[in-house]
Each structure stands twice: as C-alpha cells, then as structure tokens.
Amino acid sequence: MADFTLVVGNKNYSSWSMRAGLMVRLASIDADEVVIPLDRPETAAAIRKHSPSGKVPVLLHRGLAVWESLAIAEYLNELKPEAGLWPAAVAARAHARAISAEMHAGFAELRTHMPMNIRSSYPGKGMTPAVRADIERITSMWRDCRKRFAGAASKDDGFLFGAFGAADAMYAPVVTRFRTFGVPLDADSEAYAKAVLAHPAVAEWIDAAKNEPWLIQSCELE
Ligand SMILES: N[C@@H](CCC(=O)N[C@@H](CS)C(=O)NCC(=O)O)C(=O)O
C-alpha cells in the first residue's frame, strides 16, 4: 500500500479529479488511486468516507485528508518542491497561481455549457456569447503566458510557463472540452492544446477515461 491515496471521480467526466490526478503524477509520488463512480445512489456516502466536503478529488496522506484541487497542488508543492508544480521565478509563480485561481473560481459559462466528457464529440454544441467570452479570456491568458513566461523559463516544452506544471493541470480539462466541442482555436492556443494532449500524464488519463465502463446520462448531450 502506498503512502498516498488519491480519491477521484469518473475520469471521463470529473474535471477536478483530472487536475489533481495530473498534479500527483507531476509530483512523482507513489499513490494508490480510488475511483468512485459519480451520480449513483451510493456515490455520496462513498465520497463522504474520505472527503469532508463530500467532493472529489481528495488526497489522503498519513491520516490527513487534503481536498480542493488547488489545496492539493499546494500540499504536493510543499512536499515535493523539486517537482516544479509552480514556476521557479517569483513573478511567474504569482502569475501561475493567479490564473489557476481564476480557473478554480470562474468560467462558469464554459463549465455549464461545455461539460467535460472526454470520450464524446459534440462539435458546434454549447457555444453561446458568454461561453465565447470565457474562451476568449482563457486563450488570451494562454497566449500571454507563453509570450511572457515560457521563453524565459529554463526549459520550454510548449506549456504555459515552459515545463508542464500545476497551471497546465488546471487548464488540461479545458483543452479536452475544446476538443469535445470542436472549438476552433488560434494558432498559438492550438499549439498549446496539442502540447497538453501529448503530455504522457494527460494521454494516460484520456486513455483511462475512454476505457471506463460508466455512463452518466445527464452529461451525455443529444
Ligand atoms: N472546488 C472543488 C470542486 C470539486 C467538485 O466539484 N467535485 C465534483 C466532481 S467533478 C464532486 O465531487 N461532486 C460530487 C458528486 O458528484 O456527488 C475542487 O477544486 O476540487
């Protein structure tokens, strides 16, 4: 049994689980994984056994439960600062935390109208003026990060701050939503989306999502 356990929901539908799952992979810790299928009669009780908020993800470590995706990022960063979850430079680090917090707190229109569903394809659906505004804000942040911070990092693998980090994990489910809903992207955002999808931890999560047996009917659009 590993020292850590990450409790998540369906990999196909649970964007917050994906974020924490990617962060755990980045931190290179040995973690067991418990997947609790969402939207079933037994779901709430099963989650409550591990998570005081009644939500996933939750990271369990030596009697401690850490819930909320951003708190999990900070906990992993404290234990494994060498993993580079946040950028090394102070200004880049502040910016990475700000855009991650903006994701955590915002983009309700995008999240409502383009729900995460990795294995499905709904090109053209879900677009409204408010969703478009969310997409414009997100892609302008991506372009700005790439321009201001990625080139100045010690390593630029095509991600927001050079190397894949917690901020990229926060936006990875947005990238998969853009694919599910066939959202056309400008050239720089498309290059970033491709880099995210090609990252081994993201590719592994997507594969697992595609192979899950569960279906949540309310998340499947017509
Ligand atoms: N703000 C939380 C959001 C967690 C969240 O909303 N999780 C959803 C799944 S994506 C959940 O656990 N829902 C409970 C349920 O469906 O029963 C975070 O950042 O971790």
Image (spheres, rainbow, N blue to C red):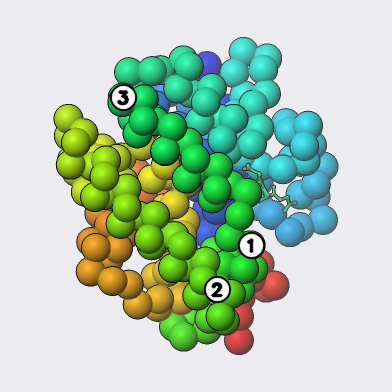
**Which residue is located at x 51 percent, y 71 percent?**
133
Q: Amino acid at mark 2?
A: Val
**Disc 1 Cβ-to-ligand 1 distance below 8 Å:** no
Q: CA distance from mark 2 to mark 1?
A: 9 Å
Q: Amino acid at mark 3?
A: Ala
For marks 3 and 2, the one nearer the N-term is 3
Counting from the top left corner in percent of width and height, residue 83 is at 34, 24
For marks 3 and 1, the one nearer the N-term is 3
Above-or-below relation of 81 to 169:
above
**Disc 3 Cβ-to-ligand 1 distance below 8 Å:** no
Counting from the top left corner in percent of width and height, residue 103 is at 54, 50
Secondary element at tag 3: loop
77 or 217: nearer the viewer = 77
Does 205 sit left or right of 4 as displayed?
left
Above-or-below relation of 153 to 196:
above
Query: Are dots 3 and 1 in contact, CB under 8 Å?
Result: no
Residue 200 appears in the picture as rendered: no
Does 47 sit left or right of 91 as displayed?
right
Q: CA distance from mark 3 to mark 1?
A: 30 Å
Label 2, on which residue? 131
**Which residue is located at x 36 percent, y 30 percent?**
91
Label 3, on which residue? 88
Label 1, on which residue? 108
Picture quarter containing residue 57? top right
